[in-house]
Image (spheres, rainbow, N blue to C red):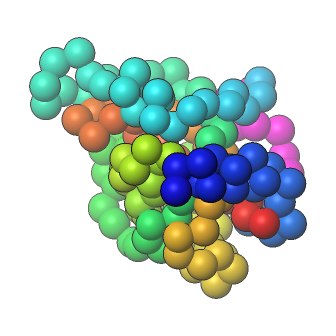
Amino acid sequence: MVVKFRVLMVLVSLCCLSVQASEQPLRFGGEYKGVNLDEFITEQQPVSQGSKVILNPAHIKTVARLKSYPEKRQVQYLYTALSMMQVSPMPAVNHRMFIESTEGKIIPVYVEDIIAGEIQQDIKLETTVLLKGYHVYNYSKGPAIVIESVSSN
């Protein structure tokens, strides 16, 4: 099962369907850094239990399985973190969904509003997708990531 999932992850790079906020330069400059989601979750834990660590946002891309569709949520802490970093213009983010790593780790991720509806309309649950976004802070569940682009085959 894991081997089939990994093969699918490689194939997802040759995607046909892409849902993304825009084709503009990346919000924080640079390029998307490819990360292994399982390793990233393990590495991005806060130093002490129950704490949150705000970071300089970094663009990342990873492959995961879509476990839930975006749902509207309160995301006040995300806006607090982005405000502290003086992000401008502020992205519109009011949704959260769950994704699953190759090894079965399920984490919540934020989703920019501009693509939230399109994900539900265009991508089926359990589909392996290529996610692009930015890592904003770490907390008890691991990395807090804002998704700005989703692609599937």
Residue drawn at (68%, 31%) of the image: 34
Q: Is residue 22 among what the camera can see?
A: no
Q: Which residues are magenta?
A: 23-29
Whether residue 25 appears in magenta in the rendering, the answer is yes
Tell me if residue 25 comes above or below residue 53 in the rendering.
below
Classify the position of the C terminus by image quarter. Answer: bottom right
Residue 36 point in image, percent of width and height: 57, 33
Residue drawn at (16%, 18%) of the image: 48
Q: Is residue 41 among what the camera can see?
A: yes
Indicate left or right for 44 with 116 as reference.
Answer: left
Residue 35 point in image, percent of width and height: 60, 30
Tell me if residue 136 comes above or below residue 46 in the rendering.
below
Indicate left or right for 95 with 25 as reference.
Answer: left
Q: Nearer the viewer, residue 36 or 60?
A: 36
Q: Nearer the viewer, residue 22 or 151?
A: 151
Whether residue 111 appears in magenta in the rendering, the answer is no
| Quadrant of residue 55 within the rendered picture | top left
| Quadrant of residue 79 within the rendered picture | top left
Q: Nearer the viewer, residue 122 or 71?
A: 122
Dominant secondary structure of the residues highlighted in magenta in the image: loop
Residue drawn at (51%, 21%) of the image: 56
